[in-house]
Image (cartoon, grey):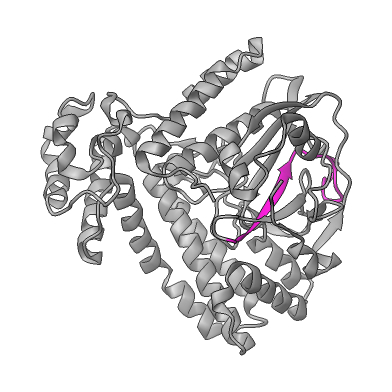
Amino acid sequence: MHHRPATAHAELGPEFFDEVAPARFPRPVLRHRNQAWAVRVGLDGLTDEEWIGHFGRFAPVPGSFETPLALRYHGHQFRSYNPDLGDGRGFLFAQLHDLLDGRLLDLATKGSGQTPWSRGADGRLTLKGGVREVLATAMLEAQGVYTSKSFSLIETGEELQRHDEPSPTRAAVLVRLSHSHIRIGTFQRRAFHRDPEGLQRLVDHAIRHYMPDLWHDDAAERGRAFYAQVAANVARMGAQWMAAGFVHGVLNTDNINITGESFDYGPWRWLPTSDPSFTAAYFDHSGLYAYGRQPETLLWNLAQLGSCLLAVVPKEALLAVLDGYEALFQADYATAILNRLGLEPRDPASDATLARAFATFLEASQVPFEQAFFDWHTGLASEPRATRSPAAAHYTHERFSAVREALSAYHPAPGANPAHPYFSRPTPCTLLIDEVEALWSPIAEHDDWSNFHGMLADIATMAEAYGNTPLRP
């Protein structure tokens, strides 16, 4: 191993976490290792057995935590405050530095056993849930979304009882790689306990380790800059989801971290076609977290963070940040649309016009969402290919005229690669819910992983075509 370990989270003190022991699994079997990101953190030289030793049996990563930390936090769950949250089936296992850019990274688990915050649950993850998270993170990364990475998936040899899938069902433990697991709910817990000193310590810790350029000698200015940066991060995240046609499904404040890096994928979905009312969670009966409501939900969550920071930042400074959210989101959405289309930006007004025209067309035409981005990657330069698309009839309709007019002013972005073999196929790689179920069936019925690995290979080809692969350090 040539990793650069860290133990930064321990600096916050024991009121922010509980030391816990991992579960002991009877028959760990490696199902997925993210070798590209293993290279980035210096763990690529591990044998599969050593990998299982660290990420299935949780032998400490040399130089990082000797004992895993279950993080403490609160949160609004479907806008109802819950003070009894925390890592109930996971923990922070290790911290490392990215060998490419030097940033601090967390290795955190899902399904690693009970903690003080399990509230009577078994602390386990279903294998199907782990498979779904591996697929979701790979697809989002391929689409250029800033997401956590599914670093490892190990089947544990246990059987679980669940009410929402056929049981008994197989169990797994997932290890997630992310730049931070400090979330809005972490601040809510300190505010709930009326701990301004702890809030300031948390803000300062976050700046030192994740936003060092923001450091200022004045504490109130540090807090304002921190809040503004979190708002920018969250706006970017939401804009990228919207451009990807992605619905997270459970946008509770404990699922939103300070780096704007989406994580904790439960009932996610990708849109078949543009639909603002489309929901991912079967239990979201009111559509609170529907596709079209994601931007406003993220703003609401940011307001909850702002209310926590009132103890350390002037109210006027916090409100100014919230007032600027919509402009941030719209600018990030235009950027995300252009990135997905492989186009070079022009100016804010033109970019916003193109983004609006494309979004309007997607909803009015009901063209398959991913197909439209695939067909028009690099803009009008791809028109000969778009005319051969299964969706070609949509592009001759009058409602596409505004998109065509906007595209006429744009050039392919530097580095765009429309000649990549991926673009010679008639349809793009997608990950709709029926496709996910089709991938799971052979695993559940015959322990056949070939379709799963085939899908990951297809997603990797997509990532390469769009230039969204991890770079080697």
Residue extending farthest top: 446
**x then y, percent, for residue 138:** 52, 37
Q: Residue at image x 86%, y 37%?
A: 23
Q: Residue at image x 55%, y 68%?
A: 303
User: From the viewer's perspective, is residue 187 above or below residue 26?
Assistant: below
Q: Does the rendering let one see residue 314?
A: no
**x then y, percent, for residue 199:** 71, 75
Q: Quadrant of residue 181?
A: bottom right
Taking depth in this image into account, of 375 and 393 the one nearest to the observer is 375
Q: Residue at image x 55%, y 55%?
A: 100
Residue 108 is inside the magenta segment = yes
Image check: 423 left or right of 235? Answer: left
Q: Residue at image x 71%, y 27%?
A: 30
> Over which residues does the magenta segment extend?
102-120
User: From the viewer's perspective, is residue 224 above or below residue 178?
Assistant: below
Residue 90 is inside the magenta segment = no
**x then y, percent, for residue 387:** 15, 29
Taking depth in this image into account, of 271 and 424 the one nearest to the observer is 424
Please state, as top left, top right, bottom left or bottom right, where the N terminus lies in the image: top right
**x then y, percent, for residue 378:** 23, 44
